[in-house]
Image: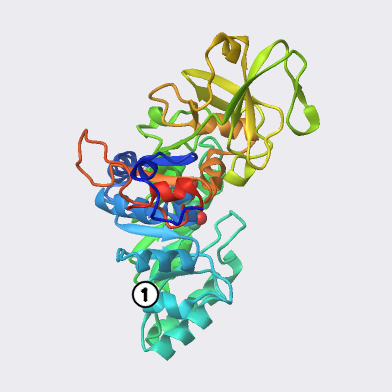
Amino acid sequence: MIAPGTAPAADRLRPPERVAVVDLDAIRSNVRRFVRVAAPARLMAVVKADAYGHGAVPVATAALEAGASWLGVAHIEEALALRAAGIDAPLLAWLHTPQSDFAGAIAAGIDLGSAGWELGPIAAVAVEQGQVARVHLKIDTGLGRNGSPAADWDALLSAAMAHQAAGRIRVVGVFSHLAVADEPDRPETDEQLAAFREFVALAERAGAAVEVRHLANTPATLTRPDTHFDLVRVGLGLYGLSPFAGTAPSALGLRPAMTLTSLVAQCKDVPAGQGVSYGLSYRTMGPSALGLIPLGYADGIPRIATGGPVRVNGVTYPVVGRIAMDQMVIDLGEAGLVASGRSATGAEAVLFGPGDDGEPSVDEWAAAAGTNNYEIVTRVSPRVQRRYLNAFPGAGDIRRQMTLESSTAVEDGPTARAARPA
Ligand SMILES: *Cc1c(COP(=O)(O)O)cnc(C)c1O
């Protein structure tokens, strides 16, 4: 083993073997699109789950540069990580347990969602710290998940107003979340919207001076201006992905930000009938070349996604046989035979990208895995390094690479060493 930092210079410049390249100009372009669509409502960039796998700090930074006014995350820990990185924009965290660090959140100026039980602990911590906690009350208008049940709303408002009168909290927001906005023909969005209006009116009648009412997610922001209110909470669309089945991102004016690539680790000729991977569920039809891709379910590629597309040397091949922990296989066919002098070993293997150069899409991987595009990008694991294009806004055509590194992206071994700044 060579100690970190002592690798030869050439090693340090070597691109990583497994990499998710995130184009921050694509993020900025998508943010600007949502800022325009949402106006006069403002945009909350939802950067939970490490910005859906894209890297929370670089994405949040790019989103704020491009006009987002707020950031949103699920957990207080995610919010604290943004604050620790020096990001001081308005920030909301909405999913808590009795163990959540309300003290840390209030001290860091993080707004807190409350569906009910959180109010007491938040108020108690605020008193202890001599601070006023900023709270957004969450009403369940039909999703049946996080949020106050309708029957408890009056009691929650009374409790909130009492805490507010005592100077412990301030109710700055009322919000809810939509269940079927990605299916614009369904009637439940209208029902949720009507219910939300009533619950907001009740809150205002109870004496809350609500600064921000917010309901819309990505699909509602795109299709339902009547759900925009003061603020829209957009996640998926920022990453350039489409929330609508059968609608490509480009049709929505969005640019996919992530490109996931590796290198062919081995290319070898096999005879007809060669079984491939655990279970031998695939056999070659004739003499063929198999290409080994060093990505598997430990990298976040769903094990079930056999058939998912991999582009090598300008041709897209489906994954054959079972996807394993570290590797998967494509069948390059007779045309790829190493014996014919065209070994693909070392060639770039692209799983998905924006599509400009014919790369497969995140949506194709979602289809292969029987899931949605959210899950494909969010699952990409810390074993895959993140790299950033266009880290500086306005760099124009000069594509600047490798200026930021996701905190979770460093892995041991020569690849990681190569990517660390000298
Ligand atoms: C994840 C989330 C969003 C963002 O949803 P998208 O469909 O990705 O735009 C908005 N609001 C809440 C409460 C969420 O949990």
Q: Is residue 86 left or right of residue 379?
A: left
Q: How many marks?
A: 1
Q: Is residue 141 left or right of residue 216?
A: right
User: Circle 1 — which element?
Assistant: loop
User: Residue 144 occupies which quadrant of the picture?
Assistant: bottom right
**Could you say where residue 389 lies in the image, as x and y percent from the top left?**
32, 41
Is residue 177 among what the camera can see? no
**Could you say where residue 132 lies in the image, as x and y percent from the top left?**
36, 82
Q: Which of 239 and 134 is in front in this view?
A: 239
Q: Is residue 394 left or right of residue 192?
A: left
**Could you say where residue 151 lies in the image, as x and y percent from the top left?**
60, 68
Is residue 332 among what the camera can see? yes
Looking at the rendered structure, the kind of residue marked 1 is Ala
Q: Nearer the viewer, residue 118 or 314?
A: 314
359 shown above or below 174: above
Instruction: Please identify the residue farthest to the right as the structure is shown.
Output: 279
**Could you say where residue 184 lies in the image, as x and y percent from the top left?**
50, 36
The residue identified by callout 1 is 108
Is ligand 1 within 8 Å of the beta carbon of the residue shown at mark 1? no
What residue is shown at x 47% (from left), y 47% (from top)?
Answer: 414
Snapshot colouring = rainbow
Mark 1 nearby-residue class (10 Å; few <14, some 14–19, many ≥20): some
87 shown above or below 356: below
